[in-house]
Amino acid sequence: MTEKIGVLGKKTSQRTDVERVVVTPLPTVYGQFRAYGYVDHERGDEQVALVHGEIGAEGVLARLHSECLTGDAFGSRHCECGDQLAAAMRSVAAAGSGVVVYLRGHEGRGIGLLAKLRAMALQAEGLDTVEANLALGLPVDARDYGVAARILGDLGVRSVRLMSNNPRKREALVRHGIEVAEQVPLLIPPCESNITYLRTKRERLDHHLPHLDALAHLTS
């Protein structure tokens, strides 16, 4: 552990592998946040945590959001990522406090942007999201949540109310030393373009998506 002094002039103890380098106010359309910028020296990624209000150590409302350029920035309807990010930020603001950890290097469940686009092209030909990754010789899910746990630890968070439909995300956080007091569903109404993708996430990746049961009329 080393002691660093951030741009706000406050001394904080930092891990040597994930280093906090900046804190700055970040006004957004969802409310006032503070952006905590980190460098992951192990992987070389730059990471950011968006904090709203004054968070404590226990039961912090939190979202670990995997980077998705197509969904988050371009509004792709192939997935629900952009809507989930917006819903998470709205929920944190409405709750009065919480944190959204935006995880760089998680594009396409960890396979990277161009590989994700290649997988999407295969899905357009009829493969599902799992089959497409495997057809490219890539892992179905290569994400690691160790950096997220270390960021939460740096923020003083010991347990979270995790906004996620993915039980593996919960298991990963617990494995890395962050207690999950509650898993809060983050259910986005599907559309014709992403219903097959969402059903695959439920049936093959164990995501908890009970709202899909009433949507048998939608097809990809």
Image (spheres, helix red, strand yellow):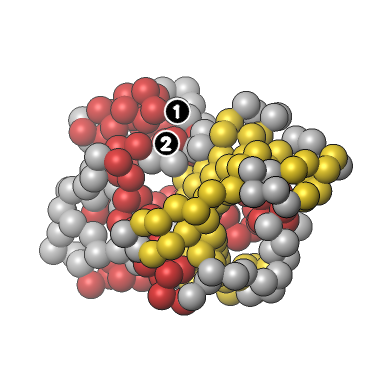
Q: Is residue 142 left or right of residue 26?
A: right
Q: Residue at x 70, y 70 (%)?
A: 57
Instruction: Tell which residue pokes out farthest to the right in this image.
Output: 1
- According to the picture, the residue beneath numbered tag 2 turns out to be 108
Query: Three-letter amino acid code at disc 1?
Result: Gly
Above or below, 130 relative to 91 = above
Q: Which residue is mark 1?
A: 112
Above or below 212: residue 173: above
Residue 133 picture quarter: top left
Q: Residue at x 63, y 74 (%)?
A: 59
Q: Amino acid at mark 2?
A: Gly
How far apart are the two marked residues, 2 and 1, measured between alpha carbons? Answer: 6 Å
As drawn, the residue found furthest toward the front would be 9
Foreground residue, 162 or 192? Answer: 162
- Which SS class for mark 1? loop
Q: Secondary structure at mark 2?
A: helix
The image quarter containing residue 84 is bottom left
Determine the residue positioned at 21% across, 30% down: 125
Residue at left offset 38%, top offset 40%: 68
Residue 82 in picture, x, y percent from top left: 32, 50
CA neighbours of label 1 inside 10 A, class few (<14), some (14 to 19), many (20+): some
Could you tell me if the residues under marks 2 and 1 are in contact, i.e. CB atoms within 8 Å? Answer: yes
* x, y percent for residue 63: 51, 59
Q: Nearer the viewer, residue 172 or 151?
A: 151
Q: Position of residue 174 (x, y in %)?
A: 70, 59
Residue 177, compared with residue 39, is above or below; it is below
Q: Is residue 135 visible?
A: no
Residue 112 appears in the figure: yes
Image quadrant holding the N terminus, namely top right
